[in-house]
Image (tube, rainbow, N blue to C red):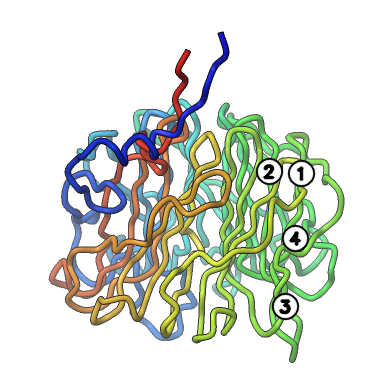
Amino acid sequence: MRVQVLLVAGALLLVPRPARPQGEPRGPEFRVNSYTTGNQGGFAPSYCLCQQGAAIAADPAGNFVVIWHSIDQDGSSYGIFGQRYGASGLPLGPEFRVNSYTTGHQRNPRVAVSDSGGFVVVWNSEQLPGGLDDAFGQRYDGSGAPVGPEFRINTAITGISWMPSVASDSAGNFVVVWQGDGSGGPGIWGQRFLSSGAPLGSDFRINTYTPVGGNATVAMAPAGDFVVVWDNQTPNVGHDIFGQMFTSAGVPVGSQFRVNTYTTGYQEKPAVATDAAGNFVVVWDSGYQDGSQWGIFGQRFASAGTPLGAEFRVNATTGLTQWSPGFGIASDADGNFVVAWYDSFNGDPYGGIFARRFASSGMPAGPEFRVNTYTTRRQNYAAVAADGPSGNFVVVWRSYLQDGSKDGVFAQRYGQIFPVELTSFRVD
């Protein structure tokens, strides 16, 4: 018998159902940090060049961990702190400190989770002479217990290694990328690790175009193939978004490629996410491309690196500024994805966190929606993570004065990126 595929979205036009909020929120927004003195996820001293907000990662079962830097909580300037959650949204244990070295600044954290729930946190630590930053990491098992001591990621220790980013495959093998110095001078660098924490070879250069890039971030498919994206800074011209693909063995796939097709002005602060097959999506800030200051744009790619369709605009509202998706993209196993960003115009008096869901085809799965319900003072610097199989996702962001003392970290849980009523079903 011939199998016919029907879109449930079409069938639903014939079946009345109650309206539900965009994004399918699960419960109210909630505070992540339990320590509320000073800044969590923000910054205090003007000389601190810090990545703002929090980082988040989720395992396939929907458990997730949020990591941020906190001022003076470890007794000496910034420290790295975290909180684990079950899929229900309930905390798993108390807030915990990640860094064991506490002198000076520990900042700019990122996190990656394996299928078993084990995770690795990376950050900058002022452990070089003169207070320069190295990249350090700490591994954890699925129960949240530290595995071994904190460890240095970069091989070269003669210059700065800045803003590390980490991604993990399903087995817990992971790769860390950073901007700054490696074993061969300035650039975008990476280091691969086994799930045991043992380095796989030495650090390797990622960029081939020589001007120093920044804002490097990495995404890894379950089988271990990975892609790195960054913004390449051309003096007096602007920025573009570049990428480089690698096999699970760390071998480059093809050459460095430019992601954006619109090249006027500045394109910067990219984020990237992969699906189970290794297809990936890159999003970034673009200046004046949408006609009004900053907007969010994206490009989809097949696992072979071939662009899928044209560059597209993420934000529907274009007044003033929509920007900083630097942590703000997550994908489910099928390639449906969600993007979150800061919006200065869209009905939130101080600027708020907005998001939009997309089908794997790149088509929007509904309009953009506001994430934060607390709208007093600013909410910005969003990050998002999704569990791969179901596509349930969590958005975290920085909120000013909501916890009673400067910046705090807040979050909102959601149902599927691509709701079940929009998926297809089979009729015999």
Residue 293 in the image: state x and y as whole percent.
Answer: 50, 86
Q: Is residue 321 left or right of residue 173?
A: left
Q: Residues within 10 Å of mark 3 (few under 14, many from 20)?
A: some
Residue 262 in the image: state x and y as whole percent.
Answer: 70, 74
Badge 1 element: strand
Q: Earlier in the sequence, mark 1 or mark 3?
A: 1
Badge 4 element: strand
How far apart, in angstroms, are the residues tagged by discs 2 and 4? 19 Å
Q: Nearer the viewer, mark 3 or mark 4?
A: 3
Q: Is residue 126 left or right of residue 192?
A: left
Q: Earlier in the sequence, mark 2 or mark 4?
A: 4
How far apart, in angstroms, are the residues tagged by discs 3 and 4? 29 Å
Q: Which residue is mark 3?
A: 263
Q: Which mark is residue 246?
A: 1
Q: Earlier in the sequence, mark 3 or mark 2?
A: 2
Circles 2 and 1, Cβ within 8 Å, touching? The answer is yes
